[in-house]
Image (cartoon, grey):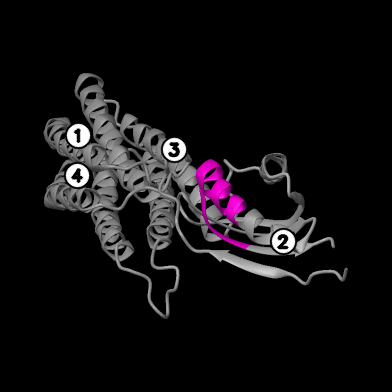
């Protein structure tokens, strides 16, 4: 019997879980968008007051936090826009839709955070070498108000969050602001009690480094998706073994390629080999089902051929 030529199967359905599935796609909802919008408006309403207060008091910690708030307001606005865009259906130009847009915004947010961190560290070094007088009283008042605003924004995002990279990047911005306010409060108290002005830039750098660590993690994860890297939670060898063990008619599986379209949405291509041509369609159906239900892969292209 001649060798059967390859057959191509495309499964375009996205997994939504069925009792024991493993779909981890973050859900884009109006709740997410509203949370980001309210947090952005809250921060935008206070950032000007903090910027003016930092300039008048001479506090780098306050000014750094205010500049960070400016980037926060812009980043939260971009996050809100990304949520709105990702809800739009696929079209002729964007056949996969706009699901990757929130990941792109998260990557951009991480870059913003790194740039702000560099600015804070450079400014802090100059301040440390030539300490400037800081008015502890106004600094303390503005920092406390900023802390309250950031706590409010944090809880808004936490309640409306879904664990996605875009929401985590937005929350990370607010946490950075919150830590900046705490550092400014601590610096104001130390300056008031001791008159030691270098504590202001020292605490600014400490907060900046905390922000940098988290920003690099978000950048790494979002870049991995943008580069179509294989999802960390899926191992190709384990996937191959599982399919061959569970589907007796499937004799071999190779050319397995996995990549993330967006967070939680995994695409795959692979070549399957069966014993005879009659096994092709049943094996394809079984593979599609198992890939969706057990591995969370909702979009798969399978090339299949038979030995006989």
- In three-dimensional space, the C-alpha distance between marks 3 and 1, rounded to whole angstroms, equals 20 Å
Q: Position of residue 297 (x, y in %)?
A: 53, 51
Q: Which residue is mark 3?
A: 209
Neighbour class for label 3 at 10 Å: few (<14), some, many (≥20)?
some
Residue at image mark 1: 151
Q: Dot 4, crowdedness within 10 Å: few (<14), some or many (≥20)? A: many
List the residue tagged with mark 4. 54
Mark yes or no: residue 38 visible. Answer: yes
Question: How many other residues sit within 10 Å of disc 2, few (<14), some (14-19) or many (≥20)?
Answer: few
Give the mark, 3 or 1, whose residue is nearer the N terminus.
1
Task: Indicate which disc, 2 or 3, sits on the residue closer to the N terminus.
Answer: 3
Left or right for 34, reference 99: left
| Residue at mark 2 to residue at mark 1: CA–CA distance | 63 Å
Q: Earlier in the sequence, mark 1 or mark 4?
A: 4
From the viewer's perspective, is the residue at label 3 or at label 1 nearer?
Answer: 1
Task: Determine which of the numbered discs, if any, sits on residue 278 in the image.
Answer: 2
For the N terminus, which image quadrant?
bottom right
């Amino acid at each position: 019997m001649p060798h059967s030529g390859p057959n191509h199967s495309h499964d375009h359905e996205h997994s939504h879980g069925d009792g024991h599935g493993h779909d981890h796609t973050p859900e884009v909802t109006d709740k997410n968008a509203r949370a980001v919008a309210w947090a952005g408006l809250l921060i935008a309403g206070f950032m000007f007051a903090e910027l003016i207060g930092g300039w008048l008091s001479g506090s780098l910690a306050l000014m750094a936090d205010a500049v960070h708030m400016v980037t926060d307001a812009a980043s939260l606005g971009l996050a809100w826009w990304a949520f709105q865009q990702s809800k739009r259906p696929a079209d002729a130009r964007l056949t996969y839709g706009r699901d990757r847009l929130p990941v792109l915004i998260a990557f951009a947010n991480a870059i913003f955070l790194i740039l702000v961190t560099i600015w804070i560290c450079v400014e802090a070094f100059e301040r440390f070498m030539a300490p400037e007088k800081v008015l502890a009283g106004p600094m303390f008042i503005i920092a406390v108000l900023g802390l309250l605003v950031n706590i409010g924004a944090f809880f808004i995002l936490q309640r409306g969050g879904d664990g996605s990279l875009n929401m985590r990047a937005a929350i990370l911005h607010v946490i950075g602001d919150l830590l900046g306010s705490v550092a400014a409060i601590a610096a104001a108290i130390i300056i008031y009690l001791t008159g030691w002005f270098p504590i202001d830039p020292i605490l600014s750098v400490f907060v900046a480094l905390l922000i940098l660590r988290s920003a690099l993690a978000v950048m790494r994860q979002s870049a991995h998706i943008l580069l179509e890297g294989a999802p960390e939670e899926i191992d190709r060898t384990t996937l191959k073994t599982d399919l061959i063990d569970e589907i007796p008619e499937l004799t071999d599986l190779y050319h397995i390629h996995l990549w993330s379209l967006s967070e939680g949405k995994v695409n795959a291509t692979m070549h399957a080999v069966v014993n005879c041509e009659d096994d092709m369609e049943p094996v394809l159906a079984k593979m599609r089902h198992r890939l969706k239900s057990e591995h969370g892969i909702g979009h798969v292209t399978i090339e299949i051929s038979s030995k006989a």
